[in-house]
Amino acid sequence: MSPNSVLPGSVRSAAEVNEQIRALWLRAGGSLSAQERAEYELLVVEWAEAIRGEIIEAA
């Protein structure tokens, strides 16, 4: 997945995004390249947004 494929306002759950983050780390062998780091940062932002959305829904 390229960093450009992560869209703002994604409808993926936090669990789905977390799984993608874990897969990225596994593929990278624990050391991220500059491109992987950019992808990771976008995924973390998406994950945080998904968590906030899930908390708001729960409330």
Image: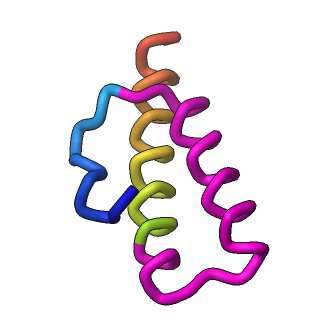
Q: Is residue 56 magenta?
A: no
Query: In the figure, is residue 17 to the left or right of 23?
Result: left
> Is 56 placed left or right of 25 in the picture?
left
Exactly how many numbered labels are in the figure? 0
The residue shown at (47%, 88%) is 34
Q: Is residue 34 above or below residue 53?
A: below
Horizontal and vertical percent position of residue 3: 33, 64
The prevailing secondary structure element of the residues shown in magenta is: helix
Residue occupying image coordinates x 68% and y 64%:
27
Boundaries of the magenta span = 12-38
Q: Is 9 left, or right, of 52 in this rendering?
A: left
- Spot occupied by residue 25 in the image (x, y as percentages of width and height): 69, 64
Q: Pick the residue in front: 39 or 56.
A: 39
On whether residue 20 falls in the magenta region, the answer is yes
Residue at x 46%, y 68% (from the top left corner): 41
> Where, by quadrant of the figure, is residue 33 drawn?
bottom right
What colour-coding does the image apply? rainbow
Name the foreground residue: 57 vs 16: 16
Quadrant of the rendering where the N terminus is positioned:
bottom left
The residue under the point 50% across, 75% down is: 36
Residue 9 position, x and y percent, is 23, 38
Please tell me whether residue 22 is drawn above or below residue 33 in the rendered image. above
Residue 47 in picture, x, y percent from top left: 49, 45
In the displayed structure, would residue 21 be above or below residue 36? above
- Left or right: residue 11 versus residue 47 is left
